[in-house]
Amino acid sequence: MALGQMIKTWFQGLRFKSRNQQLPHPSVQSNGLNFRFAASDDIRSLLDIERDVFEALPWTFSYFQHEISGNSRAVFIVSENSEKILGYIGLRWNRSLTDFHISNFAVRKAFQNKGIGSQLLKAAEDLSSYLKITHLTLEVSRPDLTAQGFYRKRGFESARILTAYYNDGRDAIEMEKELKLEL
């Protein structure tokens, strides 16, 4: 299925049920990794990654279920090797359909600092470019300087501080990146 048809089908609110459904895109396979849209049967693996990476307030099954199966404005891209899912990035369109908000993004601790996060972000940017999305936004915990550095290195800039953004009272920094559309 062509990427345009996949996106059209996805945008109409339908979901892919097959674990083998891939993003037919240049970033689909890289260094032995496969990138594809997440399906409902991937949620248990995503929860494992959540618990591995986020010590405080990880997402729940119902959050993932809603974003993957119930929200027509959301999509998750996963990165996997031949054995398991190594990371994921969640994207949500805003109402004007000009921005993607990165709702959730993680790579298993044992596979961090190997370029997987960068490749997932690149896959999100490639999808954004194809869809003529002009901005990416996200929130990152204010004390998490490592994550902020990761995003800044990839062109994100701080936009504003969100006071007591997280349920545990931590502040967040909203970051954004303007994407260059290829003509």
Image: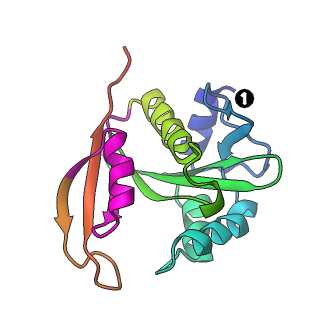
Is residue 153 in the magenta section? yes
Tell me where residue 167 sits by quadrant.
bottom left
Q: Which residue is mark 1?
A: 1
Is 44 located above or below residue 11 in the figure? below
Residue 67 visible at all: yes
In the displayed structure, does residue 49 sit left or right of residue 145? right
Three-letter code for the amino acid on which mark 1 is drawn:
Met
Q: Please say if 149 is above or below 182.
A: below
Q: Which residue sits furthest bottom?
A: 168
Q: How many marks?
A: 1
Left or right: residue 154 compared with residue 104:
left
Characterize the local packing of mark 1: few (<14), some (14-19) or many (20 or more) Cα atoms within 10 angstroms.
Answer: few
Image point 19% across, 74% down: which residue?
163
Residue in the foreground of this view, choosing between 81 and 100: 81
Given residues 34 and 93, the one toward you in this image is: 34
Residue at (38% x, 18% y) in the render: 182
Secondary structure beneath label 1: loop
Please identify the quarter of the rendering in which residue 96 is found: top left
Q: Is residue 97 visible?
A: no
Magenta-colored span = 133-158
At which x and y percent is residue 171? 25, 74
Residue 29 in the figure: left or right of residue 124:
right
At x 49%, y 40%, the residue is 124
